[in-house]
Image (cartoon, helix red, strand yellow):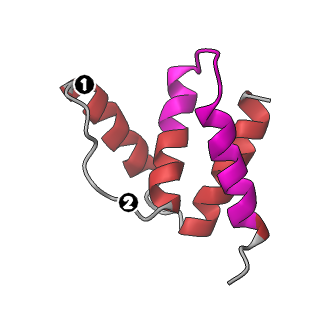
Amino acid sequence: MKKKKSQIEFEEAVAYVNSFTEPIPADVLLKLYAYYKIANSNYDNPGSKTPLINAFKANALFQAKNMNKKQAMKSYVALVEKELK
């Protein structure tokens, strides 16, 4: 099955973020986290050992909860383009 353009762009953006060496601002990281989780239909609880980090992650997910998978992928790519490139 051929991958859609949005899926390819999303995977490239994820690879870019994973190889990023500069510190990424916390607000951007939280948005990327939420978009990534939604894009991958992963609604597991945040796995940090720090309750405060889990709270921030849960809040980021809650704020993006009305997005569908495709919107989350597009938002992730747009945020990487805007903030990190």
Q: Amino acid at mark 2?
A: Asn
Task: Give the vertical position of 81 relative to 22 (above or below).
Answer: below
Secondary structure under badge 1?
helix
Question: Left or right: 21 with respect to 84?
Answer: left
List x then y, in percent, for residue 61: 40, 48
Secondary structure under badge 2?
loop
Which residues make up the magenta segment?
Answer: 6-31
Q: Quadrant of the N terminus?
A: bottom right
Asked whether 19 falls inside the magenta stretch, the response is yes
Q: Nearer the viewer, residue 79 or 47?
A: 47
Q: Hey, which quadrant is residue 20 in on the image?
A: top right
In terms of sequence position, does the residue under pointer 2 or pointer 1 come before the other?
Answer: 2
Residue occupying image coordinates x 47% and y 59%: 38
Task: Give the vertical position of 32 relative to 1 (above or below).
Answer: above
List x then y, in percent, for residue 46: 28, 42
Farthest bottom residue in view: 1
Q: Give me the disc on residue 42.
A: 2
Q: Hey, which quadrant is residue 50 in on the image?
A: top left
Q: Which residue is mark 1?
A: 52
Residue occupying image coordinates x 27% and y 34%: 54
